[in-house]
Image: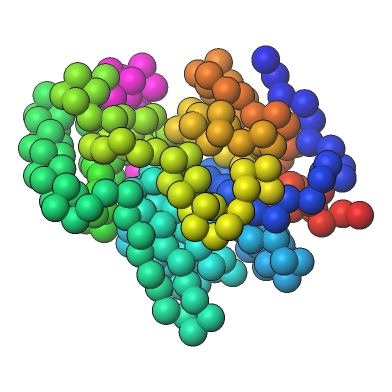
């Protein structure tokens, strides 16, 4: 089912905007000026923006230190980071340290298997900055057919892992968590209810978030993946990626 067009004035006044990053805040690998401005405007209006991303811990550290945000959920729900008023960061993980260490060893063995079994498998450039998952590049620096990407993802699932195919990566992890479960943990810790939040995303990797929240928006570049989603977004923007997010921000801020 195709989502409805994004209304000019968004219904209700969400206090939290949870959002994917790659090709939702960015577009073609870059963060548009319009997106950064939208983030700053939302922050000034008292609307908290929380990226919920498959990006590595290293990228998450960079984003929370340099963008107008105070929290971020990373590596597909493996952790969230909060920044306090003094600029200090605190990490909260979905799994205990001993469990993460054991899982990491299993993931490293699987990564080597995948790279050996699949000539078209490429680890992501940011793999060195990941602390809880492995990721394979399918549309960032490398181009891999989605059919082949799903084959690689299924191989990882058959090995007992969780694997999700996004618009640019295959993310693989071990543990009973995802973007939505950790978003719920963060909201509970902050004292927010899910009805106070909206989510925006761009790919099947965001399916758990689209299913978890009542108010959801897909940026325009999600359309090719709509059939892959169990829970498509409620609304869709006219513009792709970060330009679509800026469109959403304008609708949220418009009286």
Residue 51 visible from this viewpoint: no
The number of discs equals 0
Residue 237 percent location from the top left of the image: 73, 37
| Residue ID at (43%, 46%) | 182
Please identify the quadrant where the C terminus is shown.
bottom right
Residue 149 percent location from the top left of the image: 32, 24
Q: Is residue 19 magenta?
A: no
Residue 102 visible from this viewpoint: yes
Which residue is nearer to you in this view: 87 or 54? Answer: 87
Residue 48 higher or lower than 78, as above or below: below
| Residue ID at (72%, 66%) | 46
Q: Is residue 149 left or right of residue 215?
A: left
Residue 43, image quadrant: bottom right
Which residue is nearer to you in this view: 170 or 233? Answer: 233
The prevailing secondary structure element of the residues shown in magenta is helix
Residue 184 percent location from the top left of the image: 50, 45
Span highlighted in magenta in the image? 141-153
| Residue ID at (26%, 53%) | 130
Q: Is residue 150 magenta?
A: yes
Q: Is residue 138 left or right of residue 186?
A: left
Residue 215, image quadrant: top right
| Residue ID at (70%, 55%) | 15
Residue 120, image quadrant: top left
Which residue is nearer to you in this view: 55 or 141? Answer: 55
Q: Residue furthest bottom?
A: 86
Residue 140 percent location from the top left of the image: 39, 42
Please identify the quadrant where the N terminus is shown.
top right
Residue 174 higher or lower than 72, as above or below: above
């Amino acid at each position: 089912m195709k989502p409805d067009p994004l209304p000019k004035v968004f219904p209700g006044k969400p206090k939290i905007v949870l959002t994917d990053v790659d090709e939702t805040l960015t577009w073609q690998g870059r963060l548009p000026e319009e997106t950064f401005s939208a983030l700053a405007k939302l922050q000034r209006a008292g609307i908290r923006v929380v990226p919920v991303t498959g990006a590595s811990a290293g990228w998450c550290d960079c984003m929370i230190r340099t963008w107008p945000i105070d929290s971020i959920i990373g590596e597909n729900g493996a952790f969230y980071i909060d920044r306090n008023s003094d600029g200090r960061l605190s990490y909260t993980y979905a799994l205990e340290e001993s469990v993460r260490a054991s899982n990491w060893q299993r993931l490293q063995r699987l990564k080597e298997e995948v790279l050996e079994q699949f000539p078209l498998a490429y680890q992501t450039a940011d793999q060195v900055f990941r602390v809880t998952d492995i990721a394979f590049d399918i549309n960032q620096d490398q181009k891999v057919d989605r059919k082949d990407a799903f084959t690689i993802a299924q191989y990882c699932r058959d090995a007992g892992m969780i694997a999700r195919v996004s618009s640019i990566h295959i993310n693989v992890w071990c543990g009973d968590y995802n973007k939505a479960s950790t978003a719920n943990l963060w909201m509970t810790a902050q004292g927010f209810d899910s009805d106070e939040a909206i989510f925006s995303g761009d790919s099947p990797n965001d399916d758990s978030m689209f299913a978890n929240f009542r108010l959801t928006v897909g940026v325009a570049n999600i359309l090719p993946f709509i059939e892959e989603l169990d829970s498509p977004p409620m609304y869709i923007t006219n513009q792709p990626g970060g330009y679509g997010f800026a469109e959403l921000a304008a609708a949220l801020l418009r009286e």
